[in-house]
Amino acid sequence: MARQKFIAGNWKLNLTIAEGTALVAALAKGLAEKPTKAEVAVCPVALAVAAVAAAAKGSPIGVGAQNTHWEDKGAFTGELSPVLIKDAGAKYVILGHSERRQYYGDTDALINKRLGAALKHGLVPIVCIGETLAERQGGKLEQVLKTQITGALAGFTADQLKTLVIAYEPVWAIGTGVTATTAQAQETHAYVRSVLKGVVGGLADSIRIQYGGSVKADNAKEILSQPDVDGALVGGAALKAPYFLAIIAGAG
Ligand code: 13P
């Protein structure tokens, strides 16, 4: 089954609103000059989502948030709701990024609740999974990924999960300059798809699995050429238009 490649930039806690709108304008210009077959998105800080979405209007670039609370509204000081994310013009939401798991206590059970909220409001969820170096070296790779996938997706039907995107981001490759080898990426993505098959059956063949972790212009093309690598979730290299455009070009 042909899966459209999906390249998303996770800006994390970087760029001001003005810098974000300027970056998306530069990306839009670049894609107008050199169109891509890939789906493209950027995920700015929450405060910049509305302005970046407005600046991206009319371009093929979608906008996403980096997290969501599971409730629509209420007494949840400091939180962000799927209703507001949509209201701000976003289409996507990243869930369960390893930085949220590591620093803010995100668990598979919480990610599962966030996913429910995203799906309820029609946001395309990008659910992040990935192992630490100790887990990989300790032979726990498959067990860790399976637990993360089944935990995050528990209780949803295949029909509900039609828009799901998975981002496989080995924690040891994030921001380190160390990328998984193409063989490691392909092997792990194939394993992730096999777990998805157990959860959602045939739908697993159409779910996009992005790779994330030190994706750069010079390694993107090779990683993206692997049969089970359906895109990339890009951190640092998504912050500069020429680098991100070069990665998008690598998707064909
Ligand atoms: P880097 O591309 O900076 O390694 O970050 C990857 C990532 O965490 C994307 O979500």
Image (cartoon, rainbow, N blue to C red):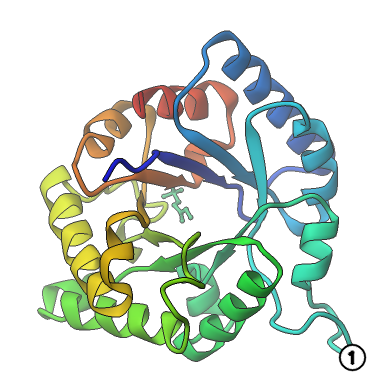
Q: Residue at x 44, y 81 (%)?
A: 152
Is residue 132 at least partly visible in the picture? no
Determine which quarter of the picture holds residue 202.
bottom left
Estimate the x, y position of residue 34 in percent, counting from the top left.
52, 12
In the rendered image, the vertical position of residue 29 relative to residue 209, given as above or below: above
Q: Residue at x 48, y 36 (%)?
A: 237
- How many dots with numbers? 1
Work out whether residue 133 can be spotted: yes
Q: On the rendered image, what quadrant is the C terminus found in? A: top left
Image coordinates of residue 110 in percent, x first then y, are 56, 87
User: What kind of residue is marked 1?
Assistant: Ala
Q: Which residue is mark 1?
A: 75
Viewer-side residue, 79 vs 99: 79
In percent of width and height, residue 41 lies at 58, 41
Q: Is residue 85 left or right of residue 157?
A: right
144 and 153: which is toward the camera: 153
Measuring 49% from the left and 78% from the top, which residue is drawn there? 101
Most foreground residue, 21 or 94: 94
Q: Residue 141's quadrant in the figure?
A: bottom left
- In the figure, is residue 250 to the left or right of 190? right
Say above or below: 133 vs 69. Answer: above
Q: Is residue 125 above or below residue 34?
A: below
Q: Nearer the viewer, residue 228 or 95?
A: 228
Q: Decide if residue 229 is on the left or right side of residue 214.
A: left
User: Which secondary structure, mark 1?
Assistant: loop
At x 17%, y 66%, the residue is 191
Q: Position of residue 25 (x, y in %)?
A: 73, 24
